[in-house]
Amino acid sequence: MGIDIKTVGIVGAGQMGSGIAHVCAMAGLDVRLNDREGSRIESGLATIDGNLARQVAKGTITDDQRRGAVGRIVQARSYDDLAPCDLVIEAATEDEATKRKIFSTLCGSLKPDAIIATNTSSISITRLAASTDRPERFIGIHFMNPVPIMQLVELIRGIATEDPTYESAKAFIGKLGKTSTMSEDFPAFIVNRILLPMINEAIYTLYEGVGSVESIDTAMKLGANHPMGPLQLADFIGLDTCLSVMQVLYEGLADSKYRPCPLLVKYVEAGWLGRKTKRGFYDYRGEVPVPTR
Ligand code: NAD
């Protein structure tokens, strides 16, 4: 039997942590939001409020629901403030040392039966579990970006994750109105294992001169019915993130088919990281995005 999750702690109030807080609060759960920097908690709360207000304006939720959700999220300035949580989800920077430090410090503040989860996109769940005092109550809960919009959540079991932990996490995702899939603990799990090599191949197609940015994106939008072209999607994800997932696949699976395209490396070295830096495979500085090749 799993545990009924009513109070959720979130460590890391960036784009993913605030999105997770948003959907938990909308599902009626109590949320405690933590970050290393207090200002990030405040900006996370402001983002959530802005996104909820947009949903009210669109008529997808009522103003009462917005106020209810905002009222259910409280700031957790220390790990001790996470003591009442049934589940704590770590959504801090994608860096193994940072995450290990969080887990080893956090455990002492939590109830013994609390579940700990990580939102990592690529780091081994089994390795992260080993830095806690409860590997059997540790699991990967991988939300997609943007969290309030994307339907899927990947659940990843580490080698020691016990059935009740998995069942509790699955029920929790159901409560959020989302769909979960189960993945074994291998590099990049399922979605990124399949998606990122496709994006990397699109970049090779550009690199080898098979097609222009526009031809490649149009080909995949109209020829494969993808809502976005692969290069447009790469810019949306962030080219640094794309490169780091490819490196995890390349190193973790030791197979040359995952080698990152040199053109992707070049864009990242130039600091052209996609939408967030206003330039990637497209230039976003003008009114409409213009291909950079
Ligand atoms: P982000 O940079 O927006 O947010 C990370 C936050 O973690 C920052 O606010 C930072 O201050 C905080 N932080 C860093 N160290 C901390 C610590 N020791 N204690 C508490 N807070 C700390 O990053 P993000 O895009 O929200 O990514 C967070 C996690 O989610 C990563 O593991 C990432 O791989 C994963 N993820 C990201 C995406 C995506 O598309 N961005 C999708 C799925 C999963």
Image (cartoon, rainbow, N blue to C red):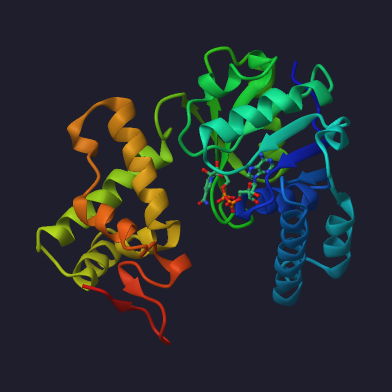
| In this rendering, position of residue 87 left or right of residue 197 | right
The vertical placement of 100 against 203, above or below, is above
Q: Position of residue 76 (x, y in %)?
A: 83, 44
253 or 184: nearer the eye? 253
For the C terminus, the quadrant is: bottom left
Name the image quarter holding residue 214.
Answer: bottom left
Name the image quarter holding residue 141.
Answer: top right
238 or 182: nearer the eye? 238
| In this rendering, position of residue 250 left or right of residue 289 | left
Name the image quarter holding residue 167.
Answer: top right
| In this rendering, position of residue 72 left or right of residue 144 | right
Q: How many marks?
A: 0
The vertical placement of 47 against 89, above or below, is below
The residue located at (74%, 20%) in the rendering is 2
The residue located at (46%, 23%) in the rendering is 184
Q: Position of residue 75 (x, y in %)?
A: 84, 49
The vertical placement of 154 against 104, above or below, is below
> Farthest bottom residue?
287
Q: Would you say residue 126 is visible in this rendering?
A: yes
The residue located at (33%, 27%) in the rendering is 252
Q: Position of residue 289 (x, y in %)?
A: 37, 79
265 or 291: nearer the eye? 265
Q: Position of residue 274 (x, y in %)?
A: 39, 65
> Farthest left residue?
209
For the N terminus, the quadrant is: top right
| In this rendering, position of residue 131 left or right of residue 216 | right
The residue located at (64%, 53%) in the rendering is 14
Q: Would you say residue 110 is visible in this rendering?
A: no
